[in-house]
Image (tube, rainbow, N blue to C red):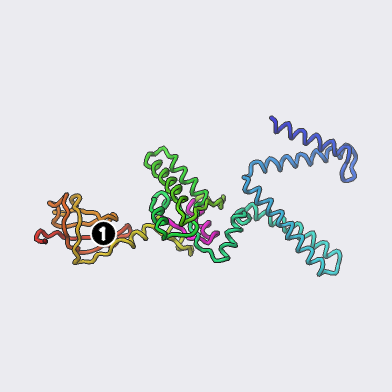
Amino acid sequence: MGLIFLRSIVLVLLAIAGYFYPPFGLGPLPGALAGLALGILIILIESRIRRAPFRIIWTASAGILLGVLVGWLLGTVFQTILRSPEMSTFIRIFFLIACPYMGFLVGIKKPEWLEPGFLNRFFRSQSGDRSCKLLDTSVIIDGRIYKVCDTGFVDGSVVVPQFVLRELQLVADSPDPLKRQRGRRGLEVLDRLKKISKVKVVISELDFPDIKDVDSKLIECAKALKAKIITNDFNLNKIAKLQGLEVLNINELANALKPVVLPGEIMRVFILKEGKEKDQGVAYLDDGTMVVVDNARRMIGQTVDITVTSVLQTTVGKMIFGRYNSDMP
């Protein structure tokens, strides 16, 4: 109700101004109608602005102002070069119209280009700081990134985009208890990361409204920031690498750090349960690697020495096969 009243006052004031001070050489009544028409145009623009996000309004305004500045500079340069007054005036008007128009379009379609944070990151990247790393939702929920950062294997800036935070919040608010627990664990991991002195956690406002998929947004964000992506997602890993981005996969790191065992070596394991085949027992190493042991079914619940027979590397990790010999000391 208050907004309607305010709009009515604006229309009345512009109509009165047009009546007593008619523009374009019009009479009082046509001047009032012209003022009223201008008021309606202003209200239409205002209603569109109210529906637009503040970020778009800011970048569009910055684009127009930057365009005016660039247009004025270019017009001044050409005015000193051209000898014809008509031509130099036309060129100056052309730049003062074209450059703000281009700036307005850039502010709407590519708002991230005009954000102060983007310019800061751009010049920082030109000075040689390439240690920026993007976290996706999967690696935050996984939690191992905290230990990796805490030990100093990851340094520099760790960037968490707002759209990743929103996805994490949706998971934390899920009606599914398991998803809700995973989401809350992810938020706790972020809170703990912010307390590590070895890394700097940055919440980025960079977004791509035209892209709906979070993985695609993350890839575009990595391109804009010239950053590496830290993830556990197999598909994101492959797509990002296909587009020439550097990816740090926590699962690949964990597999690379697993102890190397060779056939014929002796290792000590705890037989936890029976295997699928006859007389098989199953054990697990501290890092989660499964060990399948022949002739060990009767040794369930005991720690025994086994001889490694083979090692199988799979896409999900490593499996070790061994044999228990009761004659071993």
Query: Position of 282 compared to 17: left or right?
Result: left
Query: Position of 302 compared to 93: left or right?
Result: left
Q: Which residues are magenta?
A: 214-231
Verify whether residue 217 appears in magenta. yes
Verify whether residue 94 appears in magenta. no
Query: Position of 76 compared to 26: left or right?
Result: left
Q: Between residues 11 and 301, which one lies in front from this camera angle?
A: 301
Identify the residue position indicated by label 1 in the image. 319
Q: Residue at x 39, y 42 (%)?
A: 181
Q: Residue at x 51, y 48 (%)?
A: 163
Using the rendered view, name the quadrant where residue 102 is placed: bottom right
In x, y percent, where is residue 63? Answer: 68, 54
Q: Residue at x 48, y 64 (%)?
A: 244
In x, y percent, where is residue 65? Answer: 72, 54
Q: Where does the N terminus fall, quadrant-wise?
A: top right
| Predominant SS of the magenta segment | helix
Q: Secondary structure at mark 1?
A: strand
Q: Is residue 237 among the parts visible in the rendering?
A: yes
